[in-house]
Image (cartoon, rainbow, N blue to C red):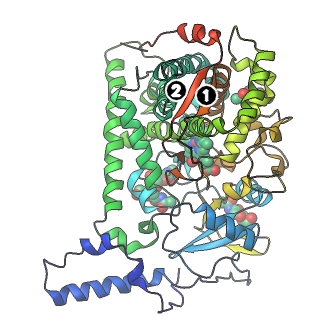
Amino acid sequence: MSSGRIPRNIPVMTIIPSSVLRLWPIASIGADVALLCFTAFILALLPYFGLRRNLVDKDGHPIPPGPLLRYPFLRRYPEKPLFRWAKQYGPLHSVWMGNQLFVVMNDPHVARDLLVTHGANFSGRWGYFMKNQTILSGRALTASPYNETWRKHRKIAMSVLNPKAALGYADGIDYETHMFLRSLHRTSRDGSAPVDPASFAGRYALNNMLAVAFGTRTLSTSDPLVDEAIRLGMEFMDLTGPWTNMIDFVKPLQWIPTRARYRARRLHSDFLSVYGAMINRVKARLDAGEQVSDCLVKTLLETQESEKLSWEDMCFIVIAFTTGGVHSTSGIIEWFLALIPSYPHIQAKAHEELDRVIGREQWPTSEDESKLPYCRAIIKEVLRAHAPFWMGTPHCSEEDFVYNGYFIPKNTVMVLNVYALHHNEDRYKDPWTFNPDRYLGDSLNASESSKLGDPFLRDHWAFGAGRRICPGMVVAERELWLAISRLLWSFSFSEVPGEPITLAQYEGLSGRTPLPYRINITPRHDGVLDILAEREEIAMRE
Ligand code: HEM
Ligand SMILES: *[C@@H]1O[C@H](CO)[C@@H](O)[C@H](O)[C@H]1NC(C)=O
Ligand SMILES: *[C@@H]1O[C@H](CO)[C@@H](O)[C@H](O)[C@H]1NC(C)=O
Ligand SMILES: *[C@@H]1O[C@H](CO)[C@@H](O)[C@H](O)[C@H]1NC(C)=O
Ligand SMILES: *[C@@H]1O[C@H](CO)[C@@H](O)[C@H](O)[C@H]1NC(C)=O
């Protein structure tokens, strides 16, 4: 791309963080040389800042409208400026991040037209320095370019995530909900002590993914793998915000030793060593002729040669599960538990439905889902009001394209504005109110809903859209159903006096989770204790 006109009036100094300046090796070289280098560095930065470039294609189509300035990064809560711009510029707008053009889809029809109808053009991923190049080295499905290798890896992932395979995990997930609720209840000392549910929800989601990926599980929240996996997941969510890393947009920063670059390289090697070692353990068991239950890693090892999978390919396919599939699912459970204490009337309505349909002798199962529309509606409403990824995972355009008279150049980052879609007043009445009633009468599951002819009627966009739509959707919905319907069946939830829970702030710059909080959970009746006592923690192997 040509660099266009460079306005000189932007105070570049103010946008270089002091951490970068401190790293500059001034002491080790002569002052003149240092000054020269520094000036050269500043000049190298200039093309990345200034006013937007209003590109037009050869037929004079302009790029979609958008804000006047270019941005080196958007700070915390980027959904806020994006929501304002959506209101100001309409269904499709553009933003320049340094030299990189972003196009933001704010309307369900536009999102469908581009990501689904023209999916062949809009299913790439952009080569983010942090997420793609450094942490995932162009792998883990989510960072793979849209090519044959992605297709092959996605097929392998789908082979263990499709609805039929998901049925095979039904018993495992059922068992994990027992252990999740049991450990929560124990820690609450039968409802007498407040609990922070995060690590319990985290272990629930992690165990489900360990079962799918390795055919194994952790035995308690004090297993070091729980902390390690959750820490790596959190680090990933902090380092891969689609808007927040200046280093992604300002190339010269990639050449110098910054803390961001260090953390990204570190995460890359931690990922490989933690999950690589786990793959090796399965391999050793297979080599020793042991019985290994069907799981992703077994499939990978068995098809390694025929599918030409490298060691890094295998590690990162596994990491797609332990990273993509853990934080997101546990995040929704954490959001649910953070908000439900504030809604006694919603709890009462769910409890009434559960008592009427299921009774107190047994708890809800997967088969009961269609009979409990209000509980289902609560889950959909949590996914709407607290989608973990407010910006989805950006796609990337493969070729120049003209849409409704607007030019979208090749290699543009395409952002699904989930935050704006979920707060669209025409689609969701009072969008800022948490109100499950809006989903009563919607009996479709997430994958059916994503295929509706009219995208305006889709339940929500939490799982993305098009050819890259979340492949874990079916398993995630099953996990969420069993965990949340059983939490509702078992407990009443209340705030800890003097500890208000804030939902407006959150952790994570790509996948969001609530700030740490504690709640009181009280068993609703004696049947709860009987059911929780039915099953014990077991090791799944060895
Ligand atoms: C509530 C839970 C979950 C949410 C909200 C969620 C959300 C998302 C979103 C928004 C995307 C990007 C879609 C797009 O590019 O348009 C995605 C992709 C992905 N998700 Fe999930 N996800 C969840 C659970 C899971 C689970 C359980 C897995 C299990 C393996 C998983 C694995 C993946 C993978 C591998 C991708 C990348 C797909 C690709 O680029 O082809 N996710 N997810
Ligand atoms: C992209 O869109 C253009 C115009 O609709 C079409 O001609 C082209 O084949 C598409 N590219 C791909 C890779 O499908
Ligand atoms: C992502 O990074 C990998 C490894 O650095 C690179 O081969 C690939 O081309 C990058 N993808 C894109 C879309 O730039
Ligand atoms: C797809 O892209 C990845 C990452 O750049 C690359 O390693 C791989 O060789 C590509 N696959 C094909 C079939 O071109
Ligand atoms: C979604 O609903 C369809 C139709 O009712 C069904 O065939 C499919 O198995 C359901 N998927 C899940 C994951 O429940």
* Label 2 to label 1: alpha-carbon separation: 8 Å
Write down the quadrant of residue 409 in the picture.
bottom right
* Viewer-side residue, 523 vs 203: 523
Residue 70 position, x and y percent, is 55, 78
**Sequence-wise first label, 2 or 1:** 2
For this rendering, which residue is in front, 64 or 296?
Answer: 64
Q: Position of residue 180 (x, y in %)?
A: 52, 23
310 up-or-down from 176: above or below? below
Horizontal side, residue 103 vs residue 434: left or right: left
The residue under the point 76% across, 14% down is: 358
Eyeballing the image, is 214 above or below 10?
above
Q: Position of residue 41 (x, y in %)?
A: 32, 82
The residue tagged with tag 2: helix, strand or loop? helix
Determine the image quadrant of residue 45: bottom left
**Mark 1 sits near ligand 1, with its Cβ under 8 Å away:** yes
The reply to whether discs 2 and 1 touch (Cβ–Cβ < 8 Å) is: yes
Amino acid marked by disc 2: Asn
| Mark drawn on residue 281 | none
Location of mark 2 (residue) = 208
Q: Secondary structure at mark 1?
A: helix
Specify whether residue 442 is in view. Answer: yes
Q: Amino acid at mark 1?
A: Glu
Report whether 66 appears left or right of 125.
right
Residue at the image point whose x is 59% and y is 18% from the top = 174
Q: Residue at x 80, y 52 (%)?
A: 430
Is residue 446 placed above or below 537 in the rendered structure?
below
Instruction: Report the residue marked by disc 1.
Output: 479
Q: Residue at x 70, y 48 (%)?
A: 461
